[in-house]
Image (tube, helix red, strand yellow):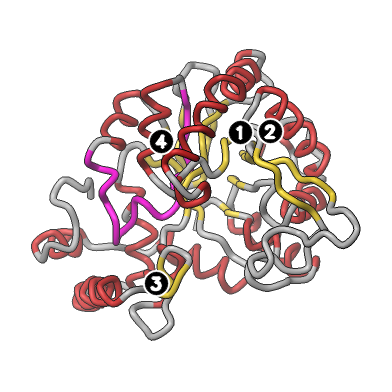
Amino acid sequence: MQLKTRHWDRIGNGGLTFTELGFGTAPLGNLYRAISDEEADAVLTRAWDLGVRYYDTAPLYGLGLSETRLNRFLRDKPRDQYVLSTKIGRLLRRCEAGEERDCIGKFFDVPARKEVYDYSYDGVMRSVEFSLERLGVDSIDILFAHDLDIFNHGSQEALDAKLAELMSGGYKALVSLRDQGTIKAFGAGVNEWQPCQWMTEQGDFDLFLLAGRYTLLEQEALESFLPLATKRGIGIIIGGPYNSGILATGAKPGAYYNYDPAPQDILDRVARIEAVCQRHGVRMVDAAFQFPLRHPAVVSVIPGGQGVSEMDANLAAATAAIPGALWDDLKAEGLMRDDAPV
C-alpha cells in the first residue's frame, strides 16, 4: 500500500513533499538500548521499501551515531527522492581523558562526546558543516533548532536566555541559509508548544517538530499555537505521537508517558480512551497515529522504530481505517477537545 504524501510550500521555493509516515531516527542512536549496525540498516531498508521518504535526525541522537548510520543508508539513494532534516543548537565536543560522556542511561554504546549548547550564528554554521560530514550528503532540507524548551533547559529564565541567543545569532544564520537555497526550510524541534508560539511571533519560521504535545492524549496546542501556525502557513511535524509509549502499549503497569512512568491520572485517561477505541474495533495505537494528521497544519508523523517489526507496526497504524464515529464518541465523553479537527 502506497503511503500518502503531503506537499508543503510556504514561501514559494518549491517546498517539500513529506510522507505522512516519517522516520524519527533517535532509536538509531542506541536510544535506551544498543542495536547493531546491521539492525539499524535493516529497519532503514524496511522503511524505504515501505515508501517512507522523510527522515529526521540530530547530532544529539547517539552523540553523532544516528547521523553516521544514516550516512551508509542514504549513500546510494537519489537525493531528490527523500526529505532530510537535522538539528542545530548542540555541538559535540570530544571527551578529555577521564571525562564522562553525556547522556548516560539514555544512549548506549555511543562515542565519547560532550554536548555543548550553542544557538549562535557561528554555532549554527559549524553544526551544519559537522552534520553534512556525518551524514555524507551535499544538502540538508530542514534545520531545526533543537530543544528550546523548559524540559531541557530547566527553567523559563534559562530558556529565555537560549531563545535570545537564537534570535540574535543563530536565527540570522538560518535565514541566510534559506535565502541562499542551502536549505529549504527551518524551524525548531521541541517538547513544548509554548516556545513554538513565541518563535512564531518573533520571526519567520517555516516548520516545527513538536514532540508529544498534539496527540490523542493532549490537545492544548489548539488554544492558540496551532491556529496561528495554520494562519502563517507553518507546517507541523508530530514526534512522539504515542506520548513516550502509553498510547501504543495501553494503560498497563510500567507504561511510560513523557519519558517517565505514567502517573495514575494519565493511566486512567488512557484506559478510557482505549475503551472507546475497543468499542469501535480500532486499535488505540492506530487512532493515536492518525489523529494528528487530521489537523491541516500537520505534514508528517514520525514515530521512532528500532526494529523491522516496529516499522511494520507504524505502517499498519498509518494505513488503518478509522471510523468517524470514534472521534465523535471521544469528544462526547470529554476525552478530546471539541475543536480538534477530525
Crowd rating for badge 3 (residues with CA inside 10 Å; few <14, some 14–19, many 20+) = many
Instruction: Name the residue carrying label 3.
Output: 246
Q: Which one is earlier in the sequence, the residue at label 3 or at label 2?
A: 2
| SS class, disc 4 | helix
As drawn, 175 above or below 22: above
| Residue designated by label 2 | 140
Q: Is 94 on the left-hand or right-hand side of 116? A: right
Residue drawn at x 43%, y 82% is 254
Most foreground residue, 281 or 307: 307
- For label 1, the residue is 143
Residue farthest along the left direction in this orientation: 332
Q: What is the distance, in whole Å, between disc 3 and disc 1 at their CAs?
A: 29 Å
- Please identify, in this view, whether the residue under mark 3 or under mark 4 is nearer the observer: 4
* Mark 3–mark 4 CB contact (< 8 Å): no
Question: Disc 3 to disc 2, how far (Cα)?
Answer: 32 Å
What residue sits 42% from the left and 34% below the top? 235
Q: How many marks?
A: 4
Residue under label 4: 196
